[in-house]
Image: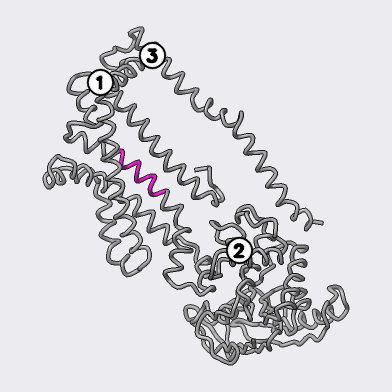
């Protein structure tokens, strides 16, 4: 009897799934959005009121509407796109370079224990240096142009990606590798068909935290000396005593940062749909 | 394909787990390796499979001494060990080479054989334990192995699924005349399936007893003959010394 129950379970669960997907397109999809938006909306409203009524001096904390106006003003004179463009460009290039190095080095260290013995202690030592400490040196070496900023971001992105690649490869289930061996796969086939897909979740986690650090480092890099970029707006706001410019920049960072993370998260969900916990991260 | 295991022994970190294990399997025979947990059954099977090469003694497959994983050997593990990123059909065809269409055609045939024709698109996380183990069985069979090694393949399943898969295994055996070595701690499973049962005992494990069953198939699970075999095996397992 138990057996027949088990057999029908397969069809049951597929039915359930269909019901679920129908639900998510309707009401239940909107509900988390409303719940998540409630608190920010209330806070912004309170803030607006406090600023308008003068409880908080506007030269210290301008109202949300003023910040929005600042952003719209920047958009109207066209400089907004330049600032956003250059910042995104720096993060993107730095992210690519950092990820490339991390994948190559992490792959070598993950696959060959000899390489781990050679490289890993040194990399771990470098990791314990706060990455921002490199800034003066990079500026000294490469000037305050693009190369020093991009390098800066690449260094920030490198470590989380590297660590996750190494631990992802090291954490591949030995039992799955044995299955591959049982079918006579050689080392290259084992890497391609078992180790890479199995370490993909860890790699994507690394990419996401790497991207987060990339945004952190672009601010640091642009604070040090830049004539464009969202980080430059922060400096500009400080020097011209206009908190609304600083806050506008912060808001833009939040939006773009969230957007880029959302892109990676979508990639993650798409490529890791087979995971038992997909969708919860 | 015949199998001959000569004086196989294995130690881990200086501690002997099994020693002087010898037995033979004629082509198409089903051999059961039976014993308490920790007596080294799986260790012997891993040596036979070639996954473990650190053993003493020799394993002969069809008269030649095996030095590693043999192409004609299939292995079904205790757990399904499916690749979680592949669906049922892709898991079944994992060990195949050749064009994709041929692989899929063959994969569907074997999925039908194990009764999962309608579930080829499901991923391992969506399969029940019994279904996942069926996929694993199909994956092991699809390369038409002449020797099939099973490491307690049904031990994690409920009694009903277990019986069903045991009969499935016998059907496959009848069709392909595979030589089978089955590691199990389930005496009833051994007496139902095997032509010969090798009982391992002591630590380090040695061959304690070898038993040939001449019962014709299909066997009756509740028959007095099988019960007599069970009593004989129980008598040999010295259960007092646990």
The chain holding disc 3 is A
Relative image position of residue A220 (x, y in whole percent):
23, 37
Image mark for residue A77: 1
Relative image position of residue B131 (x, y in whole percent):
68, 60
Classify residue A118 as left or right of residue B90. Answer: left
Q: Residue at x 51, y 78 (%)?
A: B52
Mark 1, other Cα within 10 Å: few <14 / some 14–19 / many ≥20: few
Relative image position of residue A85 (x, y in whole percent):
28, 34
Q: Earlier in the sequence, mark 1 or mark 3?
A: 3
Give the alpha-carbon distance from disc 2 to disc 3, as whole Å. 63 Å
Q: Residue at x 63, y 65 (%)?
A: B105
Give the alpha-carbon distance from disc 2 to disc 1, as whole Å. 59 Å
- Residue at the extreme right of the image, as rendered: B224
The residue closer to the viewer here, B35 or A45, is A45
The residue where tag 2 is placed is: B104
Q: Residue at x 68, y 74 (%)?
A: B184
Asked if residue A92 is positioned above or below residue A228 in the image, the reply reads below
The chain holding disc 2 is B
Q: Judging from the image, what secondary structure is the residue with disc 2 in?
A: helix
Asked if residue B85 is positioned above or below residue A81 in the image, the reply reads below
Classify residue B142 as left or right of residue A263. Answer: right
The residue closer to the viewer here, A6 or A22, is A22
Give the alpha-carbon distance from disc 1 to disc 3, as whole Å. 25 Å
Q: Closer to us: mark 1 or mark 3?
A: 1
Q: Judging from the image, what secondary structure is the residue with disc 1 in?
A: loop
Mark 2, other Cα within 10 Å: few <14 / some 14–19 / many ≥20: some
Please say whether residue A209 is one of the residues in the magenta stretch: yes
Please say whether residue B191 is one of the residues in the magenta stretch: no
Q: Quadrant of residue A61?
A: top left
Magenta residues (range):
A205-215
Relative image position of residue B48 (x, y in whole percent):
58, 82
The residue where tag 3 is placed is: A48
């Amino acid at each position: 009897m138990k057996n027949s129950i088990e057999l029908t379970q397969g069809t049951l669960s597929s039915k359930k799934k269909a019901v679920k997907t129908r639900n998510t397109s309707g009401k239940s999809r909107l509900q988390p959005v409303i719940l998540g938006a409630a608190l920010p909306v209330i806070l912004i409203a309170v803030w607006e009121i406090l600023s308008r009524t003068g409880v908080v001096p506007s030269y210290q904390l301008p109202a949300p509407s003023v910040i929005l106006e600042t952003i719209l003003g920047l958009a109207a004179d066209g400089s907004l796109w330049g600032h956003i463009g250059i910042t995104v460009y720096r993060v993107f290039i730095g992210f690519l370079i950092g990820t490339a190095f991390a994948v190559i080095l992490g792959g070598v260290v993950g696959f060959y224990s000899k390489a781990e013995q050679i490289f890993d202690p040194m990399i771990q030592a470098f990791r314990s240096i706060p990455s921002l400490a490199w800034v003066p040196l990079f500026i000294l070496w490469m000037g305050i142009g693009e190369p020093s900023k991009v390098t800066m971001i690449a260094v920030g992105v490198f470590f989380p990606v590297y660590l996750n690649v190494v631990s992802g490869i090291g954490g591949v289930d030995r039992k799955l590798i044995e299955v591959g061996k049982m079918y006579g796969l050689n080392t290259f086939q084992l890497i391609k068909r078992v180790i890479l897909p199995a370490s993909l979740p860890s790699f994507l986690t690394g990419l996401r935290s790497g991207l987060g650090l990339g945004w952190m480092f672009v601010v640091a890099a642009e604070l040090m000396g830049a004539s464009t970029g969202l980080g430059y707006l922060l400096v500009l706001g400080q020097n011209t005593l206009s908190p609304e410019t600083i806050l506008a920049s912060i808001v833009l960072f939040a939006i773009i940062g969230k957007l880029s993370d959302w892109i990676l998260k979508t990639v993650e969900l798409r490529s890791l749909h087979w995971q038992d916990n997909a969708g919860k991260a | 394909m015949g199998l001959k295991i000569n004086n196989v022994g294995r130690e881990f970190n200086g501690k002997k787990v099994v020693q002087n294990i010898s037995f033979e399997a004629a082509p198409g025979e089903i051999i059961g390796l039976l014993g308490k947990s920790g007596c080294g059954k799986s260790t012997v099977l891993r040596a036979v499979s070639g996954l473990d090469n650190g053993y003493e003694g020799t394993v002969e497959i069809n008269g030649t001494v095996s030095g590693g994983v043999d192409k004609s050997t299939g292995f079904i593990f205790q757990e399904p060990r499916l690749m979680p990123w592949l669906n049922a059909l892709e898991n079944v065809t994992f060990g195949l080479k050749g064009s994709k269409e041929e692989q899929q055609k063959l994969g569907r045939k074997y999925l039908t054989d194990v009764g999962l024709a309608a579930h080829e698109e499901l991923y391992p996380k969506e399969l029940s334990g019994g279904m996942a183990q069926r996929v694993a069985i199909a994956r092991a069979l699809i390369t038409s192995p002449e020797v099939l090694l099973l490491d307690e393949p049904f031990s994690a399943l409920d009694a009903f699924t277990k019986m069903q898969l045991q009969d499935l295994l016998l059907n496959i055996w009848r069709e392909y005349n595979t030589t089978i070595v089955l590691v199990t701690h389930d005496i009833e499973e051994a007496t139902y399936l095997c032509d010969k049962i090798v009982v391992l005992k002591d630590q380090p494990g040695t061959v304690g007893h070898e038993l040939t069953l001449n019962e014709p198939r299909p066997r009756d699970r509740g028959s007095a003959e099988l019960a007599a075999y069970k009593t004989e095996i129980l008598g040999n397992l010295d259960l007092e010394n646990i």
